[in-house]
Amino acid sequence: MNFQKLPFDTDTMLAGLKPWIECESPTFDPTAVDRMVDLAAYELAAIGAEIERIPGRMGFGGSVRARFPHRDFGKPGILISGHLDTVHPIGTLEKNPWRIENGRCYGPGIQDMKGGNYVSLEAIRQLILAGIETPLPITVLFTPDEEVGTPSTRELIEMEARKNKVVLVPEPARPDGGAVTGRYAIARFNVKTSGRPSHAGWALKDGRSAIAAMARKVLEIEAMTGEDCTFSVGVIHAGQWVNCVSSFCDAEVLSMAKRQKDLDHGVERMLALAGEENDVVIEVKRGVTRPVWEPDAGTMAVYELARDIAGEIGFNLSHASAGGGSDGNFTGALGIPTLDSIGVRGAGLHTLGEYIEVDSLVERAQLMAGLLLRLK
């Protein structure tokens, strides 16, 4: 059957997607993420998948793995890998509520990446309803912690990928609607300054402010950004009493590079910042890292197939390596053919204006269905 004849319906997909968006699931709220996993697990089970719930660890929510019936069940096939966590705290829905305006549908996490996840399930659903068995068995794995670097489920994703021939990642499409065939390396760091407390009113000079030291360090870190490697301070926590000189300050830093050797050099530069300055101790610890994923022949073959399918649908699917890590970093770096960012089109991810283009729902469902039908 021609995938373009599958009865994808925009209104039906919007109705199904709405509960996913209205189930807020910030990474650091495992209970909220588990509620979202419940929704997805039910949806997958209703389609006919064999469901396995995987408990969370390290303070994160759990995962769901779904395998669909197939004559080659258990043999290497297609892994659809996605995350159900978002960067938006509970309550964001009040600021960016579900709404459809001028061909756009808004809501927290709708672009990154609940829209792409839901479209993938819809593609599988329509294939099953049409009685079509894909050439390869399909596994879906949804995880809870991608937005913080996947510290608790990297091994799970990598092991699942190793059991399959191809990995499809329905992260949001690039700004031009294109796919991602490689990603830059990313490293996270935790920086702590430890000073000396004192009363900020009558003994200010006796103290050594951890906040002031961190402020100087932030400028130093961000000034290290160059063409080969970038550094950004995204989180700072410090202080409790305004009348106390702060004794501790914590910061989180993200570094990104197009080449692994540049990231490795960036890691060295960050770790070299540790020491002591003006009686303030500076500690730097390396956090989770995403390896460079460079496109290889296997990935490009999957992309060429996707481009042909897109052409049949009526749009051009470009490709590029990209910044902004995803779990495709892990699978692609393992040498497993991986096609990333084939999810919905939109803009504003990680902002209060996040939205998707409504007309991309059917387009991307067709793209996913076409890939599932033609990958062998």
Image (cartoon, rainbow, N blue to C red):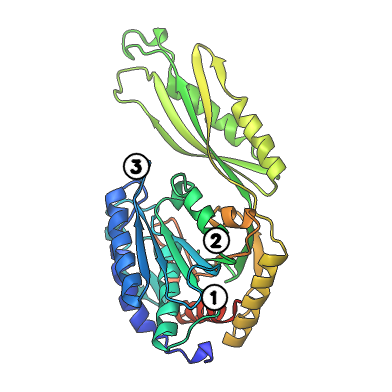
Instruction: Write down the residue under mark 3.
Output: 59
Q: Position of residue 171 (x, y in %)?
A: 50, 64
Instruction: Report which quarter residue 361 is drawn in.
Output: bottom left
Q: Position of residue 65 (x, y in %)?
A: 40, 62
Q: Position of residue 71 (x, y in %)?
A: 48, 78
| Front position among marks 1 and 3 | 1
Please tell me how crowded label 3 is: few (under 14), some (14-19), or many (20+) other residues with Cα within 10 Å: few
Q: Earlier in the sequence, mark 2 or mark 3?
A: 3
Quadrant holding the C terminus: bottom right
The amino acid type, in three-letter code, at marker 3 is Gly
Secondary structure beneath disc 2?
Answer: loop
Mark 1 touches mark 2? (CB < 8 Å): no
In the picture, measured across the screen, residue 365 lies left or right of residue 38, that is right
Q: Residue at x 31, y 49 (%)?
A: 30
Judging depth in this view, the residue of 118 and 198 nearest the camera is: 118
Image label count = 3
Mark seen at residue 136: 1
Instruction: Write down the residue under mark 2.
Output: 163
